[in-house]
Image: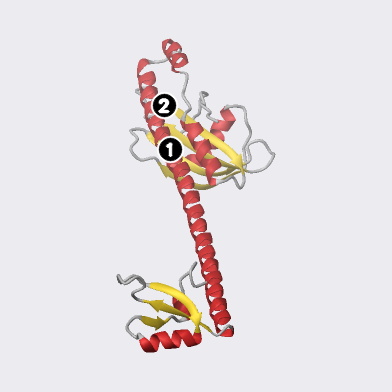
Amino acid sequence: MGIRFQHNVIYPSRADLTKSFADIFQRLRAVNGLGPAPLKIDSVQPVSGSQEQCVEAIGQVNPDGNGMREMKMLLSKTSPDQYGNYFFIASQYQLPLGATEQQHAIATAIMARYKADMQLVQARATAQAAPMIAQMQRTYQAHQAALRSMQQQAIDNIHQIGANATARYNANQQMIERQHESWRQGEDDISRNNQGFHNYLLDQTVIQDNNMYGNGTIGHGTVWNSTADALVKAYPNRYEIVSTPNFWKGWDY
């Protein structure tokens, strides 16, 4: 998942990593005993906020002759020391083509957890100039800061994927509930209209009593048409005919 190249590369120290990434990538492979690899770069972007030069490259690579794979690499370069020496530090992951956003986010999070063996670095300090080691440590810190930034971005992407999935689920549930409510309303309308037609066949009418118990309580009742007509004519302020849309569910139908 993470690779730290430690062999000598002869390359101009002022090279722009953004423009020279592909060439540096192949040279790093060469000094590690690997042949040239087919490489397709989609983007190479500088990593902001770093004291050293760091870039993030995204694209595809065929590392072993078995086909192209999706690749993301973080490449950092120290400033030259007094002897003109400097270091490259690189971390990368590779995934099958067509990998999902979640796979990319997880791979980035794993890559961001890469830690160099600093005890080994210290053990080799006796064989190297102190300024070179100090410069390498500064670049390593900048590299780690860039990796932490990538890790946070990966975590945010994972959270966003979950939030998007939840939003889609909630929207789907709301749509289903609206469909159910529409169906229930349709069934209710059918039942109400069926009862109205049933009353018509039986010469019955639903009337409303606006003072059922003498205390202003409103009630409904189904009576013969002749009875309904007589009550409404005799007590127009108390009784009224109820049309089908105003039937009470559970009472009139």
Give the residue at mark 1.
150
Q: Check residue 81 in the rendering and tell me which mark sits there, or answer none.
A: none
Q: Nearer the viewer, residue 121 or 18?
A: 121
> Is 110 on the left-hand or right-hand side of 148?
right
- The residue under the point 45% across, 14% down is 119
The one of 180 and 228 positioned closer to us in this rendering = 228
Classed neighbour count for the residue bearing mark 2: other residues with Cα under 10 Å, few (<14), some (14–19), many (≥20):
many
Query: Which residue was labeled with disc 2?
Result: 86
Spot the residue most to the left.
215
Amino acid residing under circle 1: Met
Could you say whether the residue bearing mark 1 is in a helix, strand or loop? helix
Residue 202, picture quadrant: bottom right
User: In which quadrant of the rendered view does residue 197 lie?
Assistant: bottom right
Is label 1 in contact with label 2 (beta carbons under 8 Å)? no
Please tell me which residue is depicted at 51% across the width and 69% down the height of the picture: 185
The residue at 44%/17% (across/down) is: 118
**In x, y percent, where is residue 125?**
42, 13
Residue 30 position, x and y percent, is: 59, 31
* Structural distance between the alpha carbons of marks 1 and 2: 24 Å
On the rendered image, what quadrant is the N terminus found in? top right
Image coords of residue 54 (percent x, y): 41, 36
Judge by depth and name the residue closer to the eye, 98 or 56: 98
